[in-house]
Image (cartoon, grey):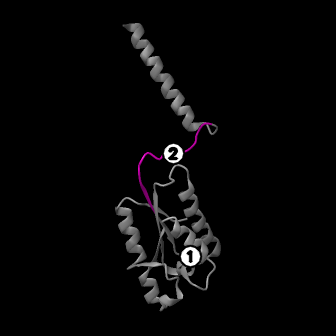
Amino acid sequence: MKNYTLILVAFAFLTFAKTASAQTDPAVFTGATAKLKHYDALYILNSNDEKKIKGTLRNIDNALEDVRLKGKLHVELVVFGDGVAVYMKSGAYEQALKDLQAKGVVLAQCSNTIRERKIDKADLFPFVSYVPSGNGEIIIRQYEGWAVVHP
């Protein structure tokens, strides 16, 4: 019986040691495993900085293309404040936005920003959706369990 117990303890130790080294060894670690059937992510954009806008759109596309999340990820991009620039017809982001929308991304604009800045909705792309407030959307989605990403 002692030998059996000793073998079990040794096996448990080796299993733990292998798991621990796999998590710390950069050559072995491959990231988290997507164990759920579905994931929700809310991306936030409140800047008109071109680098920030392009980075956010690229981050969304990268997440959608991640092999672990492929077909499991639902994304919403909520825009408020200076971020409204991404949805302006005068901007350079129409095709990138259409491409994301074709992949299922919901493109949402804060109505408060539109009202407060006296922006005519006709100046924004017609495929954009509206939420009452960007901050309200963030709060609600957070409490619904969405990952909130602010690149």
The residue type indicated by label 2 comes to Ala
Determine the residue positioned at 43% across, 89% down. Answer: 115
Determine the residue positioned at 57% across, 81% down. Answer: 85
Magenta span of residues: 28-41
Helix or strand or loop: what does disc 1 sit on?
A: loop
Helix or strand or loop: what does disc 2 sit on?
A: loop
Q: Quadrant of the N terminus?
A: top left
Residue 136 vertical placement versus 119 (above, below): above
The alpha-carbon separation of the residues under discs 1 and 2 comes to 30 Å
Determine the residue positioned at 60% across, 36% down. Answer: 28
Q: Nearer the viewer, residue 101 or 85?
A: 101
Question: Of discs 1 and 2, which sits in the foreground?
Answer: 2
Residue 47 numbered mark, or none = 1
Residue that numbered label 2 is attached to: 32
Side of 97 where 7 appears, left or right: left
Label 1 Cα neighbours within 10 Å, binned few <14 / some 14-19 / many ≥20: some
The residue type indicated by label 1 comes to Ser
Query: Total label count?
Result: 2
